[in-house]
Amino acid sequence: MFRFLLMATMVAPPSVATSAPLDLLVGSYTGDGGPGIYVFRFDPASGRLEQRPWQTVQLHNPSWLVLAPDRRHVYAVNENGPEQPDPVGRVSRLRLDPATHRLELDGQVPSLGDEPTHASLSPDGRYLFVANYAVNADPGGTLAVVPVAADGSLRPPTQLSSYQASGVDRERQASAHVHSATMAPDGRHLLVADLGGDRVYAYRYDPQASAERPLRPAPEPFVALPPGSGPRHLVFDATGRHAYLTLEMSGQVAVLDYADGRLAVREVLDLFAPGFSGDNGAGAIHLSADGRFLYAVNRGSDNHIVVFAVDPHDGGLRQLQRRAAGGRQPREFAIAPGGRFVLVAAQGDDRITVIERDDRTGLLGRSVQQVEVAAPSDLKFLP
């Protein structure tokens, strides 16, 4: 099935060189007094970040960032909760100057839940779908729908959905923990991963039917994942027919087939090495720009990035490499434009690690640089 790989490696054109400096947005946790959002300049030719950010923005726990399609707004979820200085989960809007990339905070709304960890925009830009993880069992995790006005400003949530926990793990699955909300490439369905319930829920996106409640359950409202696996983040391939899901608690990635709001599990693959007996914590997952390679991290006591080749015919995966992530608790990573470097946010070591990448083989090479950043949690490049 994977004889395609050698041929693809031989004939695939090299990535287009990117030489102009890029700006990198870094979201982070602020428990140790960090500012929240950092903006670093990145050299895509050498793979080096400037040691100090050229801009910072003071925000509580902006752990996930969303860049609006018009490149004039950035949305941040403020992962606040009962144990934080600000106990209210929020969503922030920042104005982004398209020429200078200067950021300016311009409004917040409550997320109507604790510890929001993820968000995504609807294809038409009218709504932000916010995953309230909620560490505590009461009230548990929820999905909030936040309307976005024509000028990019946020309105209070108009729809809130709650879920039932699986209870397989008595500590971590005593309640729902919504970890992500991802639009399918068809633009008509939203997929919501609930770590606490071992399910991914499917919604039909239909704002014409109700502007205040644009989501309604799909005919097949969810797909069940293995008990105790803990679904986290989901990505789709370019065809829209295949999806890949990290299972945080079991340290695995699930391969799913997708059609018209329906997900079906095809196989589940380990991210840890054979014989590994430590703690798992599958996290970030991304495809390369050409769709030929999938990357996923396993945190816990493993702290590796796993590289898979993607079969272009059926979306199947074959493991190519396991490489140390360059730090503890690699919460997120980003493949730099041009494809030659991967930047890893090592939350547990307060740093970003830059790793070389071969865009022909997909393999990761040496570490180029490490830059100190307090508890980094998300990385987004600005075009």
Image: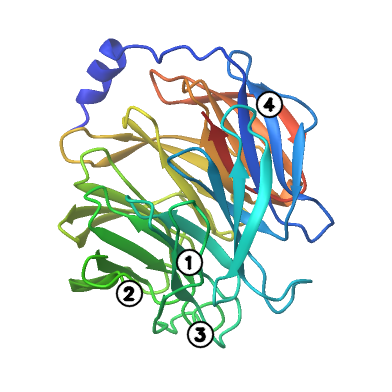
Name the front one of labels 4 and 2: 2
In the rendered view, would you say 142 is above or below 311?
below
> The N terminus lies in which quarter of the figure?
top left
User: Which residue is depicted at the point 27% across and 73% down?
Assistant: 210
Graded by Cα atoms within 10 Å as few (under 14), some (14 to 19) or many (20 or more), the crowding at tag 2 reads some
In the rendered view, would you say 140 is above or below 8?
below
* Residue picked out by circle 4: 41
* Residue picked out by circle 3: 174
- Which type of secondary structure does the marked residue at label 3 adopt? loop
* Residue picked out by circle 2: 213
* Residue picked out by circle 1: 131
- Which type of secondary structure does the marked residue at label 4 adopt? strand
The span from disc 1 to disc 4 (Cα, nearest Å) is: 30 Å
Q: Where's residue 70, x and y in %?
A: 45, 39
Badge 4 or badge 3: first in the primary sequence:
4
Amino acid tagged 1 = Ala
User: Which residue is depicted at the point 38% across and 18% down?
Assistant: 360
